[in-house]
Image: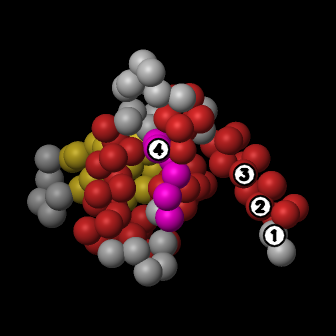
């Protein structure tokens, strides 16, 4: 946890909450490894700026790993870290809850 006084639930929501992070995590988990362009194509209506911001945030929190290959054109791949994979059951539970309670 980054802030020792932070509520664990608040920490979880800060790390994986929002409009885009759950979708990003879900798609990376489905494919194990995704390049930036592939990820961008899978998420409708997200801007490149927003995708970059969200990926950086997930990387800073240790949820997503970014691997850069030193080639031209640049190749960047994103995958879930061990910490990130531990979040997937939480997202799955949220999805089940949403399906059950969606009105």
Identify residue for label 1. Answer: 102
Which is more foreground, mark 4 or mark 3? Answer: 4
Q: Position of residue 13 (x, y in %)?
A: 54, 44
Q: Indicate the secondary structure of the residue bearing disc 4.
A: helix
Between the C-alphas of marks 1 and 4, the distance is 23 Å
Between 87 and 39, the one nearer to me in the picture:
87
Q: Residue at x 33, y 75 (%)?
A: 47
Left or right: 81 as drawn, with respect to 75: right
Q: Indicate the secondary structure of the residue bearing disc 1.
A: loop
Is 71 drawn above or below residue 67 in the view shown?
A: below
Residue stretch rendered in magenta on the structure = 14-19
Q: Indicate the secondary structure of the residue bearing disc 2.
A: helix
Q: Quadrant of residue 9?
A: top right
- Tag 1 and tag 2, C-beta contact below 8 Å: yes
Which one is earlier in the sequence, the residue at label 1 or at label 4? 4
Identify residue for label 3. Answer: 94
Is 17 drawn above or below residue 19 in the view shown?
A: above
Identify residue for label 2. Answer: 98
Identify residue for label 4. Answer: 14
Image quadrant containing the C terminus: bottom right
Which one is earlier in the sequence, the residue at label 3 or at label 1? 3
């Amino acid at each position: 946890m980054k802030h020792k006084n932070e509520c664990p639930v608040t920490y979880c929501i800060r790390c994986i909450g929002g409009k885009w992070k759950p979708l990003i995590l879900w798609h990376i988990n489905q494919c194990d490894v995704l390049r930036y362009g592939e990820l961008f194509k899978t998420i409708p209506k997200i801007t490149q700026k927003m995708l970059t911001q969200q990926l950086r945030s997930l990387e800073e929190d240790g949820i997503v790993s970014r691997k850069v290959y030193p080639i031209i054109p640049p190749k960047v791949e994103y995958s879930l870290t061990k910490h990130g994979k531990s979040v997937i059951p939480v997202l799955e539970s949220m999805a089940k809850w949403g399906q059950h309670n969606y009105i």
